[in-house]
Each structure stands twice: as structure tokens, then as C-alpha cells.
Image (spheres, grey):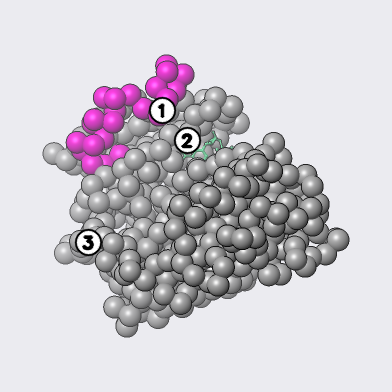
Amino acid sequence: MTKVAVANGDGIGPEIMGAVLSIFKAAKVPLEFEFVDMGKWVFDKGYSNGMTPEAQQTIESLGILFKGPMETPKGKGVKSVNVTARKTWNTYANKRTFQTLHGVDTVFSKAGIPIDITIVRENIEDTYGGIEHMLTHDVALSRRFITRPGSLQVIKYAFEMAKKKGAKRITCGHKANIMKLTDGLFLDVFYEVAKEYPSLKSDDVIVDDLCMKLVSRPDLFDVVVLTNLQGDIVSDLCAGLVGGLGFAPSANIGDHISIFEAVHGTAPDIAGKNIANPTALLLSGFGMLRHLGLMEAATIIENALLYTLESGVHTGDFGDKTIPSLSTTEFADAIIGNFGKEPDNNPKPFIADQEPTPTSFKLEKNPMLESMELSRVSIVGVDMFVESNLQPTIIAEKCLNHTADIFKLVTISNRGTQVWPKGSSFTNLVNQYCCRFESLGGEAVTQVDIMELYKRLSHDFKICSTELLNRWGDRKAYSLAQGQ
Ligand code: NAI
């Protein structure tokens, strides 16, 4: 029998996991569950990544983790175990499916507008790298990594999944109009991959517009793929469209290990009361069963859940308040009692030869190494981020005093807005400036030249950070300051 690792989680985790596993056992799902130690109490025992070495070993050998929500201890300098797990095991695609559930009233269900949206969120990169520095006492910097191979892997997965699902449309959500290099790269990769799927309608929408369109016409969307942070926000928006976090399942898909969990957290306000809604975790469990090819078991339980919801049975967080709500365990028992029944609206058909959705999309080669002609890369300058509370003209004077013979000072910006040579007295300043130096005559320079500049500048300033200005052929591989 296939074995999967199970982590109960914190807060409501043990209650909802207990409810879901009781349903699986009653349905005789052919799975064995091996419990592992992860979560807040594991942090408290001194394991800084929130899991014991035995848990890590078990998960790595079984390849599937079914997990309850886990709390991130506040103010202890530890990182979220949820994010650590996703990143450690390279579960690069986070798939979240949001569907109209009859019996769960929303403005859209009442208006007869059906929703079936799958959000695929990149799960490793972006600001979730958590690479942050205080540059000065007042200025924090977060690095946002978007890479070609990382984008390619998740976008390929999204297209494959969309094709298998029979989706009609796949949309890339982004902010490439502002973040031209990072979101621009993600969008470029999206359209490169789209060429391989001519039968799928592919398009893109700027993320703010996407949010507006999702709340006004959610029925027009099918599969939406986004970078990590934007995907996180947009998927919670979609949870709201179908009735809230209690109905939002999630699958973190990787090449070797995949993690299935609800989108919601530990709900500390209702923990230990046996009133939490186990539906999101149960829906995540269906994703796991289908991922493992257990289609029939998933369909039987899913139909029982849909029938239960349709008959008005509910926990306290949703449903008709004139009908008494059930506890977590009673709700699970009601589903078990409805095995073999089918809902009137959209019963899930069991198709015997239905294939599991793609488990992962493994890259055969690293296209980043392939796509670059290194001979065409040249360094043409450097951004020096300096700490100072002086006015821009004085900063420029100091820079020019020591460096004019080796580099050209082209612009000084503060929080991304140009303040020298031109600027506005209305621009608010913080004590950290970016001084952009370009080579004299636009010639390529070396890192030794940059070090000389660094040495000279450090007489006058504390240099907090530097970024090389690269050029790929004729293309500048850096953004301009606002107003430059
Ligand atoms: P939360 O999702 O735990 O709770 C938000 C609200 O939704 C609360 O009012 C809660 O009672 C309600 N709620 C959530 N799940 C519910 C359910 N199944 N049934 C009924 N009501 C439900 O979000 P919050 O409060 O921001 O986070 C609490 C903790 O959970 C934090 O430590 C956070 O880091 C962690 N968290 C863990 C996640 C994971 O393990 N994947 C995801 C999100 C948060």
C-alpha cells in the first residue's frame, strides 16, 4: 500500500486532520499514513527549521506530505516551516483550485455565475527568497529574484496542467509595466511557452486589473499563472469568491516531493473547540488522491462532500444560520454517512482511465546556462548605494571630486526617484541614495575599475550595497531611475 507522510500541524490542524483521515479511513482509501513531527512545538524543542531530522527523512523517502496548517513563532528569528518545506523540496508550483460549491452561498452562486479558476503560483522565488538587509537604520531592502529556469518550470507546469484539465484559457498575471526586468522576464517566458500550446488561448493581464476583473467577471477566467507574492494575494482573493478560506485547497508540486495542504492557517481563535471547517483540507486531500492516481476514491468522497454541502449541512463559518451548525467531527460523520450519494448539481464523474494531473515538470537542461552568450556581456558601470543625510547636490559634489577622472556620475536617486542632476524639491528623501556611475565613453570596464571607484568613494560615504550595470549586447540589463 502507498505510504504518505502526515503532519497534523498546529492550532486547528489536529482537529481538521483527524476529521479528514477519519473520512479517508471510512472510504477505505488504500493509503498508509506515517505521522511526522513538524510545527510550532518542534521549533520550541529547538529545531530551527520546524521539523525533526526523522520527519525530514520520512518525507524525503515517501515523496508526499499531507499537512495541517503550522504556526510561525513570532519574533524568534525563525522562518516559516511552511515556506521552508516548499523551498527545501523545490515544490515550485503551487496549484490552488477555486470552484463554486453548491450549498456554499456567495454573491456569485446567488447570481448563477459559476466559478472554476485554478491559480498556479510560483512557489520558490520572488521576495519569498527572504533575502533582506537593513541598509541604514531607516532603510530596509528586499531582493526579488525572478529567474528564467524558475519561471519556465512553473509556467510549463501550468500549461501542461491546463491542457490536461481541458482549460480554454490561460492567463499570466503580472506587473511588467512597472517591474520591466523581473515581471518582464516572467511574462516573456510565458509567451515563449505559449507558442508550444497553440490550441490554448493565452493572454496576460496586469495584476491590479486582474483583481478587478476577477471580482467582476470571475467566470471568464480558467487557469491563471503568477509570480509568488502576487499569486499569494490573488489566490486569497479567489478564495473569497467561492466562500472563503474554508474552501481553498492547495497543492505544492515538485519533481520529487509534493505537499498537500489547505490555504488557511492555524485559526488560533477557534483552535481546540471542534468547530473548524475541514473542507479545505479535505479538498486538498482530493488533490493528493488524484495526484496518486486514486481517482475512484477521490470521486466517491468528493460526491459525498458535495451532496452534504448541497443538503445545507455546515460548520459554523458558513451556510444558512437558521440551520444549526455541526462540529468538525459531526461534519466529517455527515460526509461519511453520504458515501454513495451524488449531488444534484454537477456530480463529479469518475472516469476509469482518467490520468492523474501531471505530477511535475522536470527541466531536462538549465536554459539559463544555454541562453546566454557570455561574450556579449559587458560591465558598463555600477550603482553605489550610499548612506547619507546630506542633500543631493552635496552628495554629487563629493562623488565628482574623487571619481570624475575614472567614471561619469549620471544620476542620483532616492527610493528609485531621480533627485540629481534634476529632481523636485517635493520628493521626500531618506538617508540612503543610489549613485549611478557609468564608464567614460560607454566603454566596458572591469571589476578592478569598480573596486578603485569603491575605494575612492568610501573616503566620503558608507557604501551599503553595490550592483553592477551589465549590458547584454545593445540591451541595458538594468532599470532607469524614475524621472531619469
Ligand atoms: P488563519 O487562516 O489561521 O485565520 C484567518 C481567519 O479565518 C480566522 O478568523 C480563522 O478563525 C478563520 N479560519 C481559518 N481556517 C478556518 C477553518 N478551517 N474553519 C473555520 N474558520 C477558519 O490566518 P491567520 O490568523 O493570519 O494565521 C494564523 C497562523 O497560521 C499564523 O501563525 C500563520 O503564520 C499560520 N499560517 C499557516 C499557513 C500554513 O500552514 N500553510 C497558512 C497561513 C497562515
Sequence-wise first label, 2 or 1: 1
Residue furthest to the left in view is: 1
Q: Give, as a single range, the part of the protein colored magenta.
A: 42-65
Whether the residues at callouts 2 and 1 have beta carbons within 8 Å, the answer is: yes
Q: Is residue 76 above or below residue 153?
A: above
- Is ligand 1 less than 8 Å from the beta carbon at label 2? yes
Sequence-wise first label, 1 or 3: 1
For disc 1, the neighbor class at 10 Å (few under 14, some 14 to 19, many from 20) is many
> What residue is shown with label 3?
365
Q: Position of residue 384 (x, y in %)?
A: 60, 52
Quadrant of the image for the N terminus? top left
Amino acid type of the residue that numbered disc 2 sits on in the rendered structure: Ser
> What residue is shown with label 1?
50
Q: Position of residue 133 (x, y in %)?
A: 57, 40
Of residues 74 and 421, the one drawn nearer to the viewer in this rendering: 421
Q: Position of residue 258 (x, y in %)?
A: 30, 46
Find numbered disc 2 in the image and state the secondary structure of the residue it sits on.
Answer: loop
Q: Position of residue 145 (x, y in %)?
A: 46, 54
Amino acid type of the residue that numbered disc 3 sits on in the rendered structure: Lys
Instruction: Determine which of the numbered discs, if any, sits on residue 80 in the image.
Output: 2
Of residues 30 and 362, the one drawn nearer to the viewer in this rendering: 362
Please tell me which residue is depicted at 41% across the width and 75% down the height of the picture.
Answer: 473
Find numbered disc 1 in the image and state the secondary structure of the residue it sits on.
Answer: loop
On the image, which quarter does residue 163 sit in? Answer: bottom left
Tell me the CA gap for discs 2 and 1: 8 Å
Of residues 295 and 335, the one drawn nearer to the viewer in this rendering: 295
For disc 2, the neighbor class at 10 Å (few under 14, some 14 to 19, many from 20) is some
Amino acid type of the residue that numbered disc 1 sits on in the rendered structure: Gly
For disc 3, the neighbor class at 10 Å (few under 14, some 14 to 19, many from 20) is few
Sequence-wise first label, 3 or 2: 2
